[in-house]
Image (cartoon, rainbow, N blue to C red):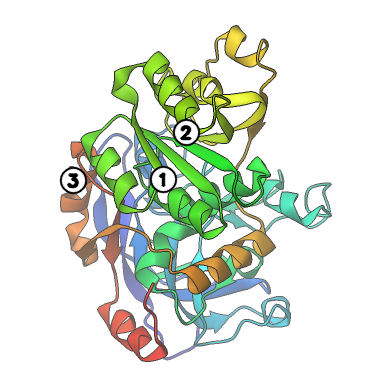
Amino acid sequence: MAPPDLPTKMKAIQVTTYKQPYEIRDVDLPSDLQSTDLLVKVAVASNCHTDSMVQQGVFGSPLPQTASHEGAGTVVAVGGAEAEKRGFKVGDRVMIGLGVYLREEPLHPCGTCRDCTGPETQTQYCPNITGHLGVTTHGCFADYVKADSRSTTPLPNAVSFLSAAPLACAGRTVWRSILQAGLQKGQWLCFVGSGGGLGHLGVQFAKALGLKVIGIDARDEGIALTKEYGADVVVDARQGKEEAVKAVQEVTKGEGADATVCISDAPTAAGLACAVTRMHGTMVQIAQPDEVVIPFPELIFRDIRIKGSLICSEEESREMLKCIAEHGVTAKTVPFKGLDKIGELVELVHGGKIQGKAVIVVDEKQIEEEKKLGAKF
């Protein structure tokens, strides 16, 4: 149960009818906390591509459905002994939500299936979870959200709520893709789709890990963001595959990138990602087009290893935040103050000109309070 000093009602941005605009509604405060659960007062919640998929009815989400699976805030209630054993307490600053498809935080993994029992880096793949925040259970575009302590990550003091919210999905997704690439310091990692919400984080993470980075994008905004965040080489995909491959080979002694992460869902992106990768190299696919299309010469004749990657496990998430605190990785955000700004946020996102991630500041007071802790990234 929630503490008696908390309100019984709260504001939430909800999908009430598929393919229709969001509604801001008064709803009940979550009160059915299980032993593993936390009740979090949301400071910042972030928009993701999956939110529009929920709105369109792609997942058949039960309605009404509170949106957003990317959030950060402060714990105001701990469900019970299981959450306490994990070290959570009232007042903790946390990051909520895991993502790409499904791009949301798993709620109540079973704890007994092959994925849950290990290795630890596969626990996020549990097929028996009871729900996904912002997709099948209520998400972070609200004053409060119920989260599972097993998939919630404490925030270092140096990491701000503004960065943490988009990191909850975009950051965790691209961080794991870099780990899956399996490279050593000094090797070349390429990102196809480097200038988006995931890409600009990936560029920073890779540089922090000592990798040399090639960024490929097809938008002026994406090219600019890739340069801004420190890619060693930036390639305009609009020049065509042959020119892109040539540009990558020029800086890699004719071999190509040691590994490539495909973030773009453009029809030709996966093929390009393989083409710019060296013979016997690895391509990690995290974009989610309806079909991943790769011409057979790029795959077979060049012996490319392809990996699919989802989201971080608990320990990978903690390592990501440690990296951010040590190296100053920041998320490019466009903040909107207040849940009532959801219409403006959607208009910007659908306009195609956004740089980084659109977020809603739900509770400005928490933003001010964390400055006292030294939150700066």
Q: Residue 191 placed where, x, y %?
A: 47, 37
Which badge, 2 or 3, is on the more N-terminal residue?
A: 2
Residue type highlighted by circle 1:
Asp
Q: How many marks?
A: 3
Quarter of the image where the C terminus is located:
bottom left
Residue at 37% in and 82% down: 7
* Pointers 2 and 1 in contact (C-beta within 8 Å): yes
> Which disc number belongs to residue 251?
2
> Which disc number belongs to residue 340?
none
Q: Residue 71 placed where, x, y %?
A: 42, 63
**Helix, strand or loop at mark 3:** helix
Q: Which residue is mark 3?
A: 348
Q: Residue 41 placed where, x, y %?
A: 41, 76
Image: 123 above or below 222: below
Which badge, 2 or 1, is on the more N-terminal residue?
A: 1
Left or right: where 47 falls relative to 342: right
Q: CA distance from mark 2 to mark 1?
A: 10 Å
> Which disc number belongs to residue 232?
1
Image: 146 above or below 112: below
Classed neighbour count for the residue bearing mark 2: other residues with Cα under 10 Å, few (<14), some (14–19), many (≥20): some
**Helix, strand or loop at mark 2:** helix
In the rendered image, is residue 285 in sight? no
Classed neighbour count for the residue bearing mark 3: other residues with Cα under 10 Å, few (<14), some (14–19), many (≥20): some
Which badge, 3 or 1, is on the more N-terminal residue?
A: 1
